[in-house]
Image: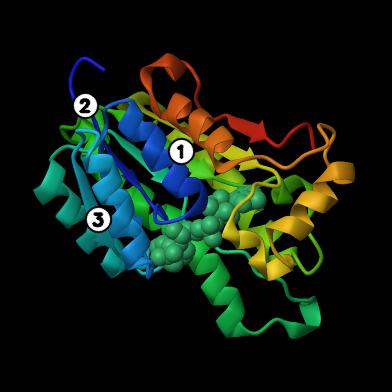
Amino acid sequence: MSQAQNILITGASRGIGQAIARQAAQQGWSIGLNYKQSQTEAMDLAEELRATGVKVVCLQADVSQQSEVQRMFREFDEALGPLHALINNAGILASFLITQVDETNLHQLYGANVFSAYYCAREAVLRMSTTSGGTGGAIVNMSSVASRLGGLSGGSAYAGSKGALDSFNLALAKEVGTQGIRVNAIRPGLIETEIHNVHGGVAQMQNMAKTAVPMGRSGTAQEVAKVAMWLAGPDASYVHGSIVDVAGGR
Ligand code: NDP
């Protein structure tokens, strides 16, 4: 990049978000690194990335809460200045049957996986839109193959939340495409992160991937991160309203 660009990554303390932050640092971005509770992991990552010469600010916020998202973006503005890209990555996996649904677990899941994307995209569009004085930018939404496969067992709520994100991605792309903002999504498949602790852990997931995935293996967070940062950057200048599967053919 000719000059430093500023990116905010939600859920960057662990897993795919952490890998995206590392990829962004390699490309010279200044990074707002959001986390909810994994403070030590976020601080350690920030220190690691700063040692490579990039600017990093840690931003604690529960992105399912609009007031916390607004505070987080104000902290980002103060620390780094203009926003050029947002990665809506934060999300949680839950497994429960339809007979086990209650208000609390449903609100928690949709808050983290869907409402968060609306709240963060709102703040990002207000800053990046060329109609409100911004210079444009990119938004990347982290969906899942669950949106078209229905998820793993007990996955109706998770799959539904990712389906909502796919539709949001398409509609937002239509809404802000002439405002200099590109909007795209990624549908990861089985990726080796702690999110799979809900379903018995990474080792069990890797075993399942041998037969469930056409490539015969699970993916790494880095393999998703490379696509995310390609979508966020100038090489994807005419990619808009798209959903890219990173799922080994699944
Ligand atoms: P991890 O569980 O490894 O990491 C989740 C990250 O999201 C953590 O940094 C966590 O922060 C953060 N987070 C969760 N809830 C909130 C919240 N309310 N506010 C702020 N941060 C939050 O998950 P992955 O890296 O695997 O998943 C990242 C994204 O990719 C998710 O949207 C997930 O649905 C999606 N995905 C993952 C797949 C996989 O196989 N791994 C497959 C398909 C999609 P903290 O640690 O501080 O709580």
207 to 248, vertically: above or below:
below
Alpha carbons under labels 1 and 3: distance apart? 20 Å
233 to 33, vertically: above or below:
above
Q: Nearer the viewer, mark 1 or mark 3?
A: 3
Is 136 on the left or on the right of 214, as rendered?
Answer: left
What secondary structure is marked by label 1? strand
Instruction: Check disc 3 and report the residue beneath it.
Output: 58
What secondary structure is marked by label 2? loop
User: Residue farthest to the left?
Assistant: 78
Q: Is residue 164 visible?
A: no
Name which residue type carries label 2.
Thr
What secondary structure is marked by label 3? strand
Alpha carbons under labels 2 and 3: distance apart? 24 Å
Label located before the other in sequence (1 or 2): 2
> Answer yes or no: do the residues labelled 1 and 2 have beta carbons within 8 Å?
no
The reply to whether the residue tagged 3 has its Cβ within 8 angstroms of ligand 1 is: no
Q: Which residue is painted at 16% across and 55% down in the image?
A: 74
Is 37 on the left or on the right of 205, as rendered?
Answer: left
Image location of residue 22, percent across then percent down:
38, 38
Name which residue type carries label 3.
Cys
Image location of residue 72, percent across then percent down:
24, 59
Image location of residue 107, percent across then percent down:
54, 75
Point out which mark residue 135 bears. Answer: 2
Q: Nearer the viewer, residue 193 or 224?
A: 193
Q: Quadrant of the C terminus?
A: top right
Point out which mark residue 140 bears. Answer: 1
Callout 2: 10 Å neighbours few (<14), some, many (20+)? some
Label located before the other in sequence (1 or 3): 3
Q: Nearer the viewer, residue 34 or 194?
A: 194
